[in-house]
Amino acid sequence: MGQISAAHYLKMKNSFRLDVARFLAGVALGKATITYGELSKQFGIATRGWGDILGGIAIRCHEAGYPLLSVMVVNAATKMPSEDAVLYADLGLESKDRIVEEQARCFQFDWSATPLKPVG
């Protein structure tokens, strides 16, 4: 790994939450993004508490060959994922342009054909 240690990578991978991933797949199907604050209200998690969970979702998506659903979660002011999300660079998203491309891939992807399909 580049910026992320092997131990932190494993911690993030183990922090994966299927309920959050499915929710984000629904956001992507709606061709939208969601802010950290909105996601926090939805799941009752502190705004700054998403790092490992979203990292776990990014890792699982990457390993399965899916677009990285975690890029659907953005800062309200910048409309981009947190600058603290250094895992993205390790997974090939080295620039804002690449993140925007990944968001577009999420919008176009058929999440209903995966285990991450939205429920409800």
Image (cartoon, grey):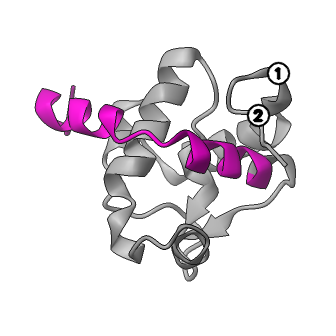
Mark 2 belongs to which amino acid?
Lys
* Residue for point 64% across, 40% down: 102
Mark 1 belongs to which amino acid?
Ala
* Residue for point 76% across, 55% down: 27
CA distance for labels 1 and 2? 7 Å
Instruction: Place residue 82 in its image quadrant.
Output: bottom left
- Asked if residue 62 can be seen in this view, the reply is yes
* Camera-side residue of 34 and 14: 14
Q: Is residue 71 left or right of residue 56?
A: right
Q: Percent position (x, y) of residue 79? A: 60, 70
Give the residue pinned by disc 2.
Answer: 117
Instruction: Place residue 39 in its image quadrant.
Output: bottom right
Quadrant (top left, top right, bottom left, bottom right) of the N terminus: top left
* Residue for point 51% across, 73% down: 40
Local crowd size for mark 1, using a 10 Å CA cut-off: few (<14), some (14–19), many (≥20): few
> CB under 8 Å between callouts 1 and 2?
yes
Image height of 38 relative to 67, above or below: below
Give the residue pinned by disc 1.
Answer: 113
Image height of 50 relative to 61, above or below: below
Q: Is residue 27 left or right of residue 13?
A: right
